[in-house]
Image (cartoon, helix red, strand yellow):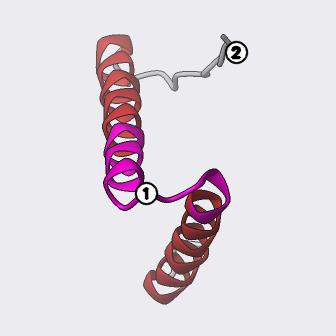
């Protein structure tokens, strides 16, 4: 499993950062499980799921632009 090193600015509690990272990982695991479940129910192949993920990422990039986040 890859490791990530995070520089925590002074004044920011380590426990807070750890909790946020854990929550993000849990959310991503739940999203992946949901995608897998839906793909099974709809009898989608890996290529279909990859295409849907690509479209989701593109939509998210556009949404972030609209919000001025990147």
Upstream in the sequence, badge 1 or badge 2?
2
Whole-percent x and y of residue 44?
Answer: 50, 59
Left or right of 65 in this view: 4: right
> What's the distance in space between the residues labelled 1 and 2, CA to CA?
31 Å
Residue drawn at the location 41% of the way across and 28% of the way down: 25
| Cβ atoms under marks 1 and 2 closer than 8 Å | no
Q: Nearer the viewer, residue 37 or 5?
A: 37
Mark 2 lies on a secondary structure that is loop
Task: Tell me: residue 62, above or below residue 28.
Answer: below
| Residue 41 found in image quarter | bottom left
Q: Position of residue 60 (x, y in %)?
A: 50, 72
Q: Residue at x 47, y 21 (%)?
A: 10
Q: Which residue is mark 2?
A: 2
Q: Assign the C terminus to one quadrant of the image.
A: bottom right
Give how far across and how far down residue 36 sits, in percent: 41, 44
Which one is in front in this view, the residue at disc 1 or the one at disc 2?
1
Q: Residue furthest front?
A: 43
Mark 1 lies on residue: 43
Q: Is residue 22 above or below residue 45?
A: above
Magenta span: 32-48
Helix or strand or loop: what does disc 1 sit on? loop
Location of residue 14 in the rendering, given as x and y in whole percent from the top left corner: 38, 13
Give the prevailing secondary structure in the magenta stretch: helix
Please state which of residues 28 and 10 is positioned toward the viewer in this rendering.
28
């Amino acid at each position: 499993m890859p490791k990530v090193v995070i520089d925590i600015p002074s004044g920011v509690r380590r426990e807070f950062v750890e909790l946020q990272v854990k929550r993000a990982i849990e959310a991503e695991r739940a999203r992946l499980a949901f995608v897998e479940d839906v793909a099974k129910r709809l009898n989608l192949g890996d290529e279909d799921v990859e295409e849907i993920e690509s479209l989701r990422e593109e939509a998210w990039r556009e949404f972030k632009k609209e919000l001025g986040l990147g």
